[in-house]
Amino acid sequence: MKKLLLVNPSKKERSGFLLSQFTRLPPLGLAYVAAATPENWEIKIIDENVTPLEFESADLVGISAFTANINRGYSIASGFRQRGAKVVMGGVHVSMLPEEALNHADSVVVGEAEGIWRKVIKDFEAGRMAKKYLGPRIDLNTQSLTPRWDLLSRDYLMQPVLTARGCPFNCSFCAVTRFFGAHYRQRTVEDVLSELEKIAGKYIGFVDDNLVGYGPENQKRAAGIFRGMIDRGMKKNWFMQTSVNAAEDEELIELAGRSGCLFAFIGFETIKPETLQSLKKRSNLKLGVKNYLKAIDIFHRAGIAVMGSFMIGNDGDDPDYCRRLLDFILESGVDVVQLSILTPLPGTPLMEKIVNEGRLVCNNFPDDWEKFRMSWVTFRPIGMNADLIYRGLNFIKKNLYDPPRFQQRMLRSFTNLKGGTSYKFVEGLNKALEETWRNAHYYDPDPEWSY
Ligand code: B12
Ligand code: SF4
């Protein structure tokens, strides 16, 4: 029997986001690749976030990677090739830059695995694997598979579920529209519910970029999923990613809360409408920055915590903006804050713009991909230099996590969410993000000057 080893690479991090049980998730993409593999293959999935990699023997090795972990992915690829195994790489980074990946792997799959993987395996068995394969965007109603959860480590609190792929918005900094397409492809309510019923664990992470979707028809589907979870007595607790304008349908958010939603990850990105324009973040422009606070209240009223994502280092940001952003975050009652630096990821409209304008400063690839993890200044923004951005990030985080602010924020979340499991997750997520800050290269517990 031939053996396929599927690897999710990770740097050895000391603590934080990828290691906390509240934030980490198993590599769902690899569980789909495994599901598409013929039955006569032995398959093993190794997620380096939880299991050390020992370069065991295998006939074929499949490696998945984002940009942030691509260099570890390349080094694992050469380790296996030196030992005589053939290596195929897939995932979002290599799909954007297949030629780069071919310097490190025997073969690359661009796009989704499900529609092409059997051909890759067949070609491998025949000893004539091609360099590049194009995985078509699959029809989620007819080609969707059940991921091989049985092969994922049990060392995770949350089980990922994907109900849709694609996004019509194409925000300038995001890879999703280019990778999964502009059409929002959805699984049916029944298909999603029957997958949920097969999951034994209590905690589900809906990893869709927007579970609620982009219009009334999509909202109806989301309502069907939430109602089905209640009617079938599933008693799951879960989180979703969605856009801030989902709060326009208050009944839907209330239903989400009743069906077990603990927190919603929402990309607010910025509190400046002109920056939303330049990022082309249409969902937020539609609702308007002035309605952000109202939207957060709607989630809280449904017992759902809000994990808000914000970015600094946009053109036009300055130290005064950092102060205003901190004031907004504190006033808003956002329960968990993911604050990053705007980063041009490969294949995105932002990367194209920054390269065309000659502003990319980290451009020694692949080595510099290490810095494309949203915590490094990788291009020259207009308005703030790198030093000011790092200080701004440190200034905001210090004000979020140092006492007494931290305790005040947690007390407010406790009150808004009426304690319970949502609040437990808020505490856990805050702890993970605080640790990430304290281990960050820009961490300064006692900055000499204030913002
Ligand atoms: C859940 C998630 C996470 C989870 C991790 C889950 C995991 N281990 O996979 C967490 C929360 C930890 C996370 C963290 C980050 N994430 Co994230 N995340 C996602 C999200 C929302 C869903 C991922 C998912 O499960 N997709 C569904 C599966 C089915 O798709 P897939 O993994 O791409 O797999 C398919 C294909 O790629 C292909 N494939 C994948 N692997 C392989 C391997 C082989 C051999 C083959 C043949 C095919 C193949 O086939 C699969 C099935 O069709 C995506 C957005 C998205 N829609 O994908 C962003 C996304 C992947 N994340 C992104 C980013 C930027 C990050 C962070 C840097 C953010 C941060 N601020 O720190 C970190 C970096 C993590 C790291 N490794 O260092 C970007 C990555 C872009 C890029 N070029 O790297 C994305 C695309 C979002 C975006 N806005 O652009 N993330
Ligand atoms: S940030 Fe969200 S809305 Fe914008 S393109 Fe990405 S997935 Fe779509």
Image: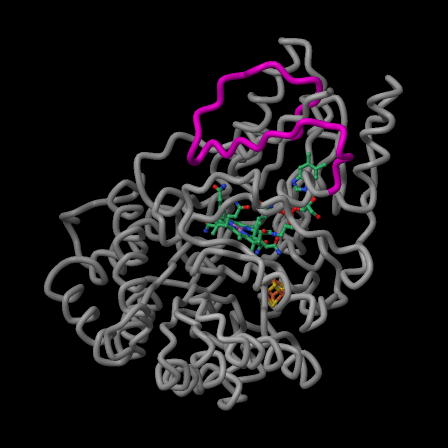
Q: Pick the residue in front: 317 or 27.
A: 27
Q: Along the horizontal axis of the image, is 166 left or right of 325?
A: right
Residue 400 horizontal/vertical position (percent): 23, 62
Q: Residue at x 39, y 67 (%)?
A: 307
Is 228 placed above or below 120 here? below
Give the quarter of the image for residue 60. Answer: top right
Q: Residue at x 59, y 47 (%)?
A: 28
Q: Pick the residue in front: 444 or 388.
A: 444
Q: Is residue 50 magenta?
A: yes
Residue 366 horizontal/vertical position (percent): 59, 29
Q: Residue at x 49, y 59 (%)?
A: 205
Q: Pick the residue in front: 384 or 428.
A: 428
Give the quarter of the image for residue 176. Answer: bottom right
What is the total number of numbered labels drawn onto the structure image? 0
Is 151 placed above or below 266 here? above
Magenta residues (range): 36-62
Residue 187 horizontal/vertical position (percent): 71, 66
Residue 386 horizontal/vertical position (percent): 39, 47
Q: How is the image coloured?
A: one colour
Q: Residue furthest left?
A: 404
Q: Is residue 111 magenta?
A: no
